[in-house]
Each structure stands twice: as structure tokens, then as C-alpha cells.
Amino acid sequence: MERPSFIFTTPFNVNVVEEKGIERVFLEGLISTTDLDLVNDIVTVDCLKSMQKQILERNIKLDLEHEAFRGDTVEEKEINKTKIPAGKLTDATVVDLGNDRFGLRIKGELNRFHKEFENTKGNIMEKYLDAYSIAFIPTKIAHVEKDGIMIRLLDDDRLLNVALTGNAVNTRALNEKVLLKAIDAVEEYKRQKLLDPELENKLEVKSYEKDGAHAHTKEGPLGLHTHPEIEKMMAYDMQSINDRINFLSERLYDSLGDNSPESVTAIKTKLKDAKDKQSRT
């Protein structure tokens, strides 16, 4: 089963501005590009456009290191989901970066009413928080192999939130400006989790650490592991094949009407032919 995915990241610069005596923090920069990231994922242009649409139509929040989805216990996770967001996104544009590269540029604002506003601003100023990270559930993916490396293409996703972090995965997605100057995605996630308890298992933290990646390479395979979604499809196909063979067997017995050696041999031959034909399709 494909789990939700955390974390494409991006370092940023800082400018301090005061507006009518009130300090506000506006963020502007790329949260994702079509470049290959450090865990062998590529976000396609279609996926960038989908995320742009979601940001414009929904109230996507900013938090710190995706704390809204973290916790070692059920209680901790539920508490973290109720934390006040560190900010929100206000605009998004898909931009042409040249050389057949594209990116998703966002505008956002830190929550100046948050009790950690000054600490967050300070961490941004000192570049301890110097990157963007996106939390999402992949809804359409493909895999291609290039130079012996299996690359995952993200064609669409459901964007949950954007975080400020210090761990860069997509090193090309740079935040160029930090200016001091509806449907809630996390609430939607909570509601959908009530309807689908397995939803949490779909949320993956995607970081550059090897254990956090799901990239298959000849040099560094991740060891023995399973793909439940593939196994489920295979089990369904095998059951369909068995059902067809049983149905064919009953039809053959009915049509022949006897259990003579010649009839049994004929049945076995036809069943084998049917199985061979199915295995080639």
C-alpha cells in the first residue's frame, strides 16, 4: 500500500520588513520542482499543477517538521493534530525554470499570533529552519528505470500541508524571499482518517535518510520487503484464474458425461491448454 509522503525541501534567504509597526513574515519560493530529488523521486508537471490547484482552492497550512502528523503514541498523534499551525499558504504558481524544468512557487505567511512566532522567525533568520517540506498522499505514480536506478514519478497527490524544516531533499527548490511583513487540509485528513483508518499508513515521511527512502537501486537495495498493493492485485488475478479453471472444468465434465480414461485425458489436456493460454495474457 502506498503510504503518504513527507518532505521535499528547500533552503531560503531572509529579508526583514516592518509594516505599520507590525512584524509579519511572508514566505515566497519554490516548494517543489521537476528535478530528481535525493531519494530518486520526480514530481511531474501535472502533479505541480494539481498541487497549485489544491493550494488555491483549499486552506493549506504551514507547520514545523510536519508536527501535525507526528507522535510515538496514538495520544501524541491526536494532540499534535490539534496544534495551532505555524502559518498558511496564500498563493501558488507553476513556473517555467528553463531547460525543460518547472517548479511550484508559493507565497505564504507565518502565523504572527502563534506563541512560537518569534522562535520560528529566529530559526529562519539563523537558517536552522532553511527548507520547505511537503506532506502528501500519492494518488497516481509510475516507475521508470534509468541508469540502473528505479525512479518514482509522482503524477498526482493529495497535498496535506507544507512544513518548515532543516533537511533538504529537493535541493533545486530554493526559497528566494522571506519577507517579515475554506477547507483545512489537516482537518480534511482527520475526517477522512475516521472513514478510512488505514489512511495513516499511507502517510510516508520522505527524507534523504536511506531508511526513509523507498528507492530501488543495484548499489543500495533496501533489503527484503513487500509491496502489499502488488501482492493484492496478484492475489486477485490468481483467484480469477482459478475461478475460470473451475468453471471450465465443470463445463467439460458436463459436456463429456463420463469418467472414462479417455474423457479424463481430454479434460486434463483442455485445462492445461486453458492455463497456458491464460499465463501468456
Image: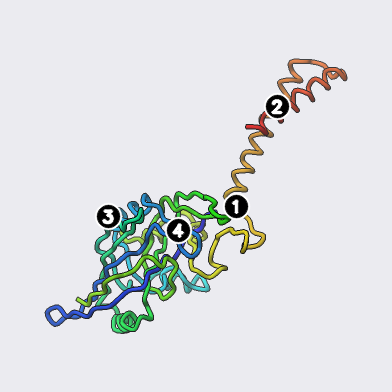
Are there few (<14), some (14-19), or many (20+) residues within 10 Å of tag 3? Answer: few
Q: Secondary structure at mark 4?
A: helix
**Residue pictured at 50% horizontal, 60% vertical:** 40
Q: Is residue 45 above or below residue 269?
A: below
Q: Quadrant of residue 169?
A: bottom left
- Amino acid type, label 1: Pro
Question: Who is closer to the viewer here, 238 or 166?
Answer: 166
Of the residues shown, which amino acid type is indicated by label 3? Glu
As measured in the structure, the alpha-carbon distance from the residue carrying label 2 to the one carrying label 4 is 44 Å
The amino acid beneath tag 4 is Lys
Q: Name the spot of residue 183 as percent of width and height, x first.
A: 30, 58
14 versus 243 height, above or below: below
**Lower sequence index among marks 4 and 1:** 4
- For mark 4, does the 10 Å Cα neighbourhood hold few (<14), some (14 to 19), or many (20 or more) residues? few
Q: Position of residue 27 (x, y in %)?
A: 27, 71
**For the residue labelled by badge 3, is the local secondary structure a helix, a strand or a loop?**
helix
Q: CA distance from mark 1 to mark 2?
A: 28 Å
Q: Which residue is mark 1?
A: 228
**Residue highlighted by disc 2:** 274
Residue for point 23% across, 75% down: 179
Alpha-carbon neighbours of circle 1 within 10 Å: few (<14), some, or many (≥20)?
few
Above or below 49: residue 112? below
